[in-house]
Image: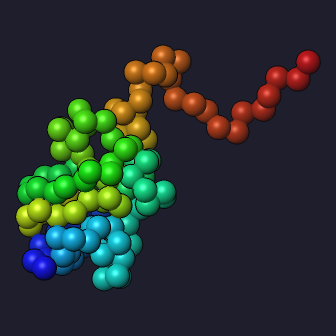
Amino acid sequence: MHAYTVQIRDRQRGTTAIVQVPADQYILQTAETQAVTLPFSCRNGACTTCAVRVLAGELHQPEAMGLSPKLQAEGYALLCVSYPRSDLVVETQDEDEVYELQFGRYFGKGKVRVGLPLDED
């Protein structure tokens, strides 16, 4: 099986990792086996924690339920369910930014705030 070179730029940490990923393996899982720590949560393509922006190259992500077809067409991907189809350069994204792009139109009142006390009657 052919392996591709995947360069992962981690915006939050200011680091870059280069991993070799076989075409039949998920990028996130393979990166972890090569001692690269990346953000993730569900590992099922249902959230946006492992979202990246594809800067160069192609990947295949048939199980990326957490990203709309529109965001996928704009170059976003979920590493937990992505297979490389060429050498790649990707950049991690802020989960809240991607979530807002994905679902922001549904939340007219802004972001949900956590930790506020409930009104007591």
- Name the spot of residue 11 as percent of width and height, x first: 30, 57
Residue 12 falls left or right of residue 21: right
Q: Residue at x 80, y 28 (%)?
A: 118
Please tell me whether residue 98 is drawn above or below residue 109 in the rendered image: below
Please tell me whether residue 7 is drawn above or below residue 36 in the rendered image: above
Q: Residue at x 88, y 23 (%)?
A: 120
Q: State the residue lying farthest toward the bottom.
A: 34
- Name the spot of residue 43 as percent of width and height, x first: 43, 60
Quarter residue 106 falls in: top left
From the viewer's side, name the closer residue of 117 and 83: 83
- Name the spot of residue 112 as percent of width and height, x first: 57, 31
Quadrant occupied by the N terminus: bottom left
Residue 120 falls left or right of residue 115: right
- Name the spot of residue 113 as percent of width and height, x first: 61, 33
Q: State the residue lying farthest toward the right.
A: 121
Q: Residue at x 52, y 29 (%)?
A: 111
Quarter residue 88 falls in: bottom left
Please tell me whether residue 76 is drawn above or below residue 22 in the rendered image: above
Q: Residue at x 12, y 73 (%)?
A: 4
